[in-house]
Amino acid sequence: MFVRFLLPFIFLFPLLTSTSRLPSFADSSEISPDPSDSCSSIHGISHIRGEPVYDPMTFSSPNYPLQYLSKQDCIRVIRATKGYEIHVIFRNYFQIERTYDRRGVFNENHVDCPNDYLELRDGPYGFSPLIGRYCGNSLPREDIRATSGYMWIRFHSDDALEYGGFTATYEFRMGYHNEHPNVGGCHFDLSNELDGEIETTTAISALLEDPSLRESECVWKVQVPSNLRVWLNIDRFSLGEPNQCASNFLEIYTGNTFDKPVKRLCGASAASIFTSHHTLFLRLFTLNSTIRRNTFISANYSAYARHKNCSMFSLYSCGDENCIPHQLVCNSRINCPYQRDEQFCEREKTWIVKLFHLSYFPLILIISVVFIIITILVLWTTKFCRCHKKERSTYLTELSSRPPPGIVMNTPLSALSTRNNHSSSH
């Protein structure tokens, strides 16, 4: 009897422990939900009597239970404990703008939902396999689940019509049936660094340990401070099957992963790319282990900004309006397109070169020049005043030794001069 009493708790224990672990939030940065954010509802925050209430096992449309807002793009990623699936259940209400044809007539056979929609994907990214895109007034009835351990959720609304929205809950269930037994993946987070290296050896070697694995997908997320951008410099690019884009490729995304990639590389070479965002995603897809074994990619990434005057922003100038943080100068990595940041590194030990690399070096130079000019003027003025004072003193001395005009001094020399004048006259 005692064992029979404990049996339900034994089966429920893994589920309880898995749900107690908080999933990760937001699209790719895993930030904590902000109650004041317009997308807070998608992260499980509801407002009761004006107070925010957080329930991580729910998500709903923005502003729910009121009509959702226009021009919204809200993203959330749910992560389950390893070995568990994510199941979604919609509750009571579902109303998202339906699909209309060009004549403005509702078309129930059109399932693309181009206007407002809720999109679910089986994975942590916007390019993960699509579970479904939902709109209209009917509750989604099918079994909605993600078997990868991640679910990517996106709610999108345009600027036209707003409706009542939806609310849903999710739960973790043990994954008895693996939907993707021969699909592998790896994820690398390279956030909070100004530069770094990316190479596929470590990722591919781990995937090669499983001989039954067919296709695989590895993703590197690069994120630098929000006031900078990412420059990606690909040193070596060698795919297992070049020019076979269905078998292997490298995709580059900026900012998010639901838009189209800014580049898709599947040839024999690759060039560097200057992005316009502080977040970058690299997605490497390989179809089988043979391709993976013959694939090698290495690249450097660096934070940069574009300014005509880098010193005004306390940045180091690469000489082409590209600026980098001073921490990246002489760090044995190429952070400038023309390697200017590594050119003077042999003499970097001298204080003169260190002074030259300072962001405020132009200010120091201007102050130094002004100081030298003022010093020269002061020295010249002091010398001039001394010379003038000496000349004046000499002049006054000579002047004081001369008799005034019209006055004859009664001296022996003057008496002798008078006698000589008299004798010459006789």
Image (spheres, grey):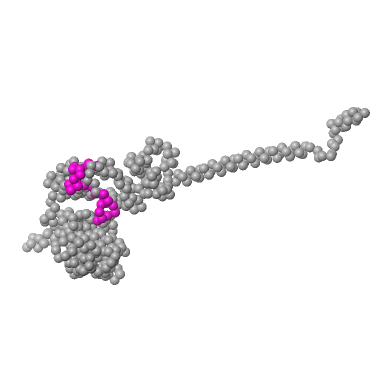
Q: Is residue 241 magenta?
A: yes
Residue lying at the far bottom in this picture: please name it: 49
The percent position of residue 309, horizontal first and vertical second, equals 42, 48
Residue lying at the far left in this picture: please name it: 1
* In the depicted structure, whether residue 23 falls above or below residue 194: below
Q: Quadrant of the N terminus?
A: bottom left
* In the depicted structure, whether residue 180 falls above or below residue 358: below
Residue at 17%, 43% (x, y): give it: 291
227 left or right of 298?
Answer: right
Residue at 25%, 54% (x, y): give it: 260
61 left or right of 308?
Answer: left
Q: In terms of secondary structure, what is the magenta stretch mainly?
A: loop
The percent position of residue 130, horizontal first and vertical second, equals 18, 57
Residue at 31%, 50% (x, y): give it: 275
Q: Quadrant of residue 397?
A: top right
Magenta span of residues: 237-263
Q: How many marks?
A: 0
Residue lying at the far right in this picture: please name it: 426
From the viewer's side, name the closer residue of 17 and 310.
310
Q: Quadrant of residue 9?
A: bottom left
Q: Quadrant of the C terminus?
A: top right
Q: Is residue 107 visible?
A: yes
Q: Quadrant of residue 173?
A: bottom left
The percent position of residue 262, horizontal first and vertical second, equals 27, 51
Residue at 20%, 61% (x, y): give it: 112
Residue lying at the far front in this picture: please name it: 103
